[in-house]
Image (tube, helix red, strand yellow):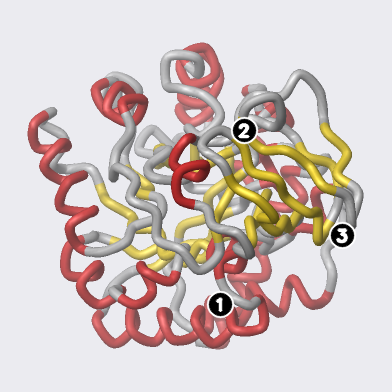
């Protein structure tokens, strides 16, 4: 079974990466929504791969999580407090958002921000701004995810930044491509066509199921991908949250029936971003995910921004190992 960490400041030293390998990590995810391969050159060439060699893991995995058609808030000069019940402007003169949302959002629609942490309702629209009411408040940071609930927006499968990063994949030892917001088989085919053009046919394609379109077409996506990733963050933002467990179970069942490997990700040990010990619910979640057939588990914020990255990985591996014994 594979265990992945997401690279970030808390694990940006050779010492921490080495410790993560020692407690059972088999590879890392690099989230390219906030950076690029070029910007990560020192981290990969001077930290990650030396630590892997030191741990005897020369064939460790390096997963590129592309930007894809995901929509995000733009760059903010400072965090913006959003108070519940107040109105805010998105677009010109306000919080920067992608042009496609300005073009296609309609009055009455809800906007999920930062994996559903914040929730807005569109009150008025124009070509350049949206007036929104804050339904669920909090602090808004730059580059947080943004989704129009109940709406399919026509966005490209791969961004120019994705293509630039793919062109460098061989140089940096990339082994897997994590493809976000897969909407159907054609998205995977487009990625594979670009990989073939670059001579990267050997890379594993992990298709993220994180929106209703992808869930509705999961069988055809399995026909085209090497692995499925049940990405519960954005998936849980695009549907009523109480429906998420049934969808996770259903995708896991379909993957198991097809012999398709699948990865489970998002908030596996979320509390360990701030605490050295997880909740009982979190370890039960991991255990049950393995019993349902997961072939890999991935930590995100727990290692990318959390205070206890090594402890989180150890709890992940030990809990999964207990589940494997039960199998």
Q: Is residue 327 left or right of residue 282?
A: left
Image point (73%, 43%), residue name: 309
Q: Dot 1 corresponds to which residue? A: 289
User: Residue 132's x, y, as percent?
Assistant: 72, 50
Q: Is residue 273 above or below residue 167?
A: below
Please state which of residues 129 and 299 is positioned toward the viewer in this rendering. Answer: 129
Q: Dot 2 corresponds to which residue? A: 91
Kindly tell me whether residue 27 is visible in this rendering. Answer: no
CA–CA distance in space, label 1 to label 2: 40 Å
User: Residue 312's x, y, as percent?
Assistant: 73, 53
Please state which of residues 185 and 324 is positioned toward the viewer in this rendering. Answer: 185
CA–CA distance in space, label 1 to label 3: 19 Å
Residues at circles 2 and 3 in contact by the CB criterion of under 8 Å:
no
CA–CA distance in space, label 2 to label 3: 41 Å
Name the mark on residue 277: 3
Q: Is residue 181 above or below residue 60?
A: below
């Amino acid at each position: 079974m594979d265990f992945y960490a997401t690279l970030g400041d808390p694990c940006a030293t050779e010492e921490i990466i080495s410790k993560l390998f020692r407690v059972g990590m088999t590879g890392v995810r690099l989230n390219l929504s906030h950076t690029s391969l070029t910007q990560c050159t020192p981290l990969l060439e001077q930290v990650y791969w030396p630590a892997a060699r030191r741990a005897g893991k020369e064939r460790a995995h390096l997963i590129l999580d592309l930007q894809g058609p995901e929509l995000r808030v733009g760059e903010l000069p400072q965090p913006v407090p959003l108070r519940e019940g107040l109105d805010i402007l998105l677009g010109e003169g306000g919080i920067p958002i992608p042009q496609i949302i300005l073009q296609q959002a309609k009055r009455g629609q809800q906007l999920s921000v930062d994996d559903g942490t914040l929730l807005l309702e569109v009150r008025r629209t124009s070509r350049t701004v949206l007036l929104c009411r804050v339904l669920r408040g909090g602090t808004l940071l730059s580059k947080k995810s943004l989704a129009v609930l109940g709406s399919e927006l026509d966005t490209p499968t791969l961004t120019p930044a994705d293509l630039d990063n793919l062109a460098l994949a061989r140089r940096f030892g990339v082994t897997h491509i994590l493809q976000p917001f897969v909407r159907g088989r054609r998205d995977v085919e487009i990625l594979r066509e670009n990989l073939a053009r670059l001579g990267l046919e050997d890379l594993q394609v992990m298709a993220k199921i994180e929106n209703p379109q992808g869930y509705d077409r999961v069988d055809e996506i399995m026909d085209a991908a090497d692995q499925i990733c049940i990405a519960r963050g954005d998936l849980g933002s695009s549907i009523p949250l109480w429906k998420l467990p049934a969808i996770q179970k259903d995708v896991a069942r379909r993957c198991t029936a097809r012999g398709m490997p699948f990865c489970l990700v998002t908030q596996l040990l979320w509390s360990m971003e701030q605490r050295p010990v997880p909740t009982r619910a979190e370890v039960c979640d991991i255990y049950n995910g393995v019993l349902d057939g997961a072939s890999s588990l991935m930590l995100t914020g727990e290692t990318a921004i959390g205070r206890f990255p090594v402890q989180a990985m150890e709890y992940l591996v030990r809990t999964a190992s207990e589940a494997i014994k039960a199998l």
